[in-house]
Amino acid sequence: MRLHVVDHPLVAHKLTTLRDRRTDSPTFRRLADELVTLLAYEATRDVRTEQVDIETPVSATTGVKLSYPRPLVVPILRAGLGMLDGMVRLLPTAEVGFLGMIRDEETLQASTYATRMPEDLSGRQVYVLDPMLATGGTLVAAIQELIKRGADDVTAVVLLAAPEGVEVMERDLAGAPVTVVTASVDERLNESGYIVPGLGDAGDRMYGAAE
Ligand SMILES: O=P(O)(O)OC[C@H]1O[C@H](OP(=O)(O)OP(=O)(O)O)[C@H](O)[C@@H]1O
Ligand SMILES: O=c1cc[nH]c(=O)[nH]1
Ligand SMILES: [Mg+2]
């Protein structure tokens, strides 16, 4: 697994406001959208392209366009949904699949409550979106499902990661074609499984407490 921490002053600036407990939901959603666009720029560095011939008003030339099969973008509901628009803005040809996953607050075990994506992902590049990589349970399960369906190149775009979650991904996805792109690897997880310093519950901060 490859880990890429995007070290850029604009990313750090937006992330600081995102972390701030005083930031309200509309601002939080806007910043998450802006941040994912910056992370997507790095995350799509190896997106597959093909050569095309075009004519400018001045001469013939060759350029590139995103190739087929189209990349698949998979936000993990709920919180990953807040990253979808920012990602598809940069990847206009992408197809979108959905995974609904929830982490049990007591056991910290992730479970899947909704799956809507192609059965066959052979030869597809997939971008998984989830703001938080905490214990890693959610992303490991999501990526194992994508690889089971044939995905041969998976990039997870996460706003924040915990070192514990990165370690679990390295262990459980060893040898798999997986890259994680994040704005920060924070200090640690606390006893409740929250990232420290983190930003709290990303889904709740975007959409309000679910229950
Ligand atoms: O790395 P893990 O320990 O598995 O935790 C990370 C997951 O927890 C949060 O989702 P949550 O279960 O709160 O669902 P929500 O997005 O609906 O709020 C977050 O959005 C990740 O999906
Ligand atoms: O800090 C955390 C950990 C898991 N999920 C969140 O939303 N926040
Ligand atoms: Mg949540």
Image (cartoon, rainbow, N blue to C red):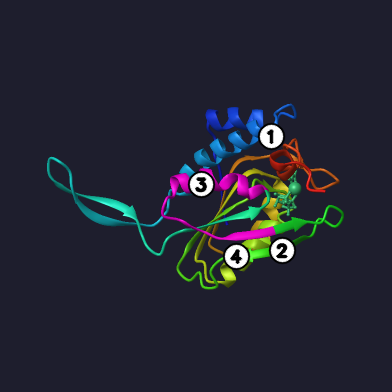
- Asked whether disc 1 touches disc 2, contact meaning CB atoms under 8 Å apart, the reply is no
Q: Earlier in the sequence, mark 3 or mark 1?
A: 1
Residue corresponding to mark 1: 25
The three-letter amino acid code for the residue at tag 4 is: Arg
Query: As drawn, is 87 to the left or to the right of 198?
Result: left
Q: Nearer the viewer, mark 3 or mark 1?
A: 1
Count neighbours of disc 3 (C-alpha within 10 A) and say few if under 14, some if 14 to 19, many if 20 or more. many
The residues bearing labels 2 and 3 have C-alpha atoms spaced at a distance of: 23 Å
What range is drawn magenta here? 79-100
Q: Earlier in the sequence, mark 1 or mark 2?
A: 1
94 in the magenta segment: yes
Q: Is residue 172 visible?
A: no
Q: Earlier in the sequence, mark 3 or mark 4?
A: 3
The residues bearing labels 3 and 4 have C-alpha atoms spaced at a distance of: 18 Å
Q: Is residue 22 visible?
A: yes
- In depth, the one of 134 and 21 nearer the eye is 21
Residue at 68 percent of width and 59 percent of height: 100
Count neighbours of disc 2 (C-alpha within 10 A) and say few if under 14, some if 14 to 19, many if 20 or more. some
- Residue 112 - label: 2
- In depth, the one of 94 and 5 nearer the eye is 94
The residues bearing labels 1 and 2 have C-alpha atoms spaced at a distance of: 25 Å
Query: As drawn, is 146 to the left or to the right of 209?
Result: left
Could you say whether the residue bearing mark 3 is in a helix, strand or loop? Answer: helix
Could you say whether the residue bearing mark 2 is in a helix, strand or loop? Answer: strand
Q: Nearer the viewer, mark 1 or mark 2?
A: 1
Residue corresponding to mark 3: 87
The three-letter amino acid code for the residue at tag 1 is: Ser
Give x and y (percent) for residue 76.
64, 55
Residue corresponding to mark 4: 116
Residue at 74 percent of width and 26 percent of height: 22
Residue furthest to the left: 59
The residues bearing labels 3 and 1 have C-alpha atoms spaced at a distance of: 20 Å
